[in-house]
Amino acid sequence: MRLLLVEDDSMIGEAVLDLLRAEHHAVDWVRDGDMADTALRTQRYDLVLLDLGLPRRDGLAVLRDLRARKDRTPVLVATARDAVPDRIAGLDAGADDYVLKPYDLDELLARIRALLRRAAGRAEPIYEHAGVSLNPSTHEATVNGEPVQLSAREWSVLEPLIARPGVVLSRTQLEEKLYGWKDEISSNAVEVYIHGLRKKLGAELIQTVRGLGYCVPKGGSGA
Ligand code: CA
C-alpha cells in the first residue's frame, strides 16, 4: 500500500520508514505540516501516519484541512503517551485512530493493518479469495493450502487487488502502491509482477480489464 509518513524527528522517521518498507509498503516521508498538506493534495494514499507536533503547520491543522476537502484517506495520529487531550482533539478533527509515542513498533503495525482493513470495508484479518490466502501480519501466502513465496513487490501489487474484489485498479494506481518518490519506475514493472503472480497463483486470480487495468473478480472460484 502507499503510505504517507509525517514526522519531523529524523531518527524516529528513519526507523518508521524502514519498518514500513519492510512491511512491503511504498512510503513517502515529509517532515513538516506544509509538505504534508502538499503531499496530500497531490498524491492519493492508503493511509497517513500523522505526527501532531510539526514545524510550519501542526498536524491537527493538516488533518482539519484534509477532512474539510472531504478527503477520506485513513489517518492514524501519533500523540505523546501522556497527552490525552491531543488524542481527543485528533479523533474529533477526523483521525480514524491514534497511536502513542514513543512507538511500540509492533502495535503501530497492527493498528496500520487494522485501519487498512477497515478502509477496504473488511473485518477479517486474512485475505481469502478463490483458494488464495494472504496474511498481512505474517506475509504468508498460500494457494489451496500450499505455501507460496511472493516477493515484496508481488505482494504490493496483489494486496490492493485482493483487498477489494471487483474493484479495477489501473496500472498507474498499482505503480503508486509499489514506489515512493525516490524510486525509479520501469514502464512495464506492473505487467512483470502480474505475470509472476499468475504463474504462482494461477492464471484466473487476476484478470486484465482491457483498457482499464486489473482486478480480482468478485466471487471467483478455483485458483
Ligand atoms: Ca513532532
Image: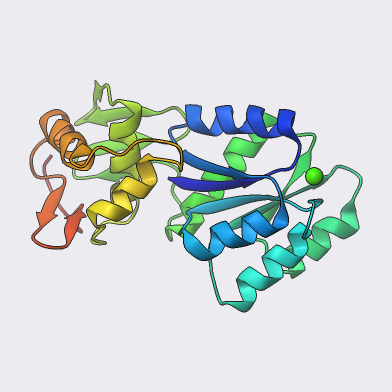
| Image spot of residue 74 (x, y percent) | 56, 59
Image quarter for ligand 1 equals top right
Instruction: Identify the image quadrant of residue 170.
Output: bottom left
Judge from the rendering whether residue 87 lies leftward or rightward of residue 141; answer left or right. right
Badge count: 0
Q: Is residue 23 visible?
A: yes
Q: Is residue 178 above or below residue 71?
A: above
Query: Which is nearer the eye, 175 or 207?
Result: 175
Report the coloring of the rendering: rainbow
At x 90%, y 50%, the residue is 83
| Image spot of residue 198 (x, y percent) | 13, 36
Query: Which is nearer the eye, 4 or 145?
Result: 4
| Image spot of residue 115 (x, y percent) | 55, 52
Can you say which quadrant of the picture contains the C terminus? top left
Can you say which quadrant of the picture contains the N terminus? top left
Judge from the rendering whether residue 64 lies leftward or rightward of residue 179; answer left or right. right
Instruction: Identify the image quadrant of residue 125.
Output: top left
At x 58%, y 38%, the residue is 110
At x 67%, y 34%, the residue is 13
Q: Is residue 30 above or below residue 42?
A: above
| Image spot of residue 199 (x, y percent) | 11, 30
Q: Is residue 94 visible?
A: no
Judge from the rendering whether residue 104 lies leftward or rightward of residue 81; answer left or right. left
Q: Is residue 132 above or below residue 60?
A: above
Q: Is residue 43 above or below residue 153?
A: below
Query: Which is nearer the eye, 140 or 145?
Result: 140
At x 35%, y 36%, the residue is 184
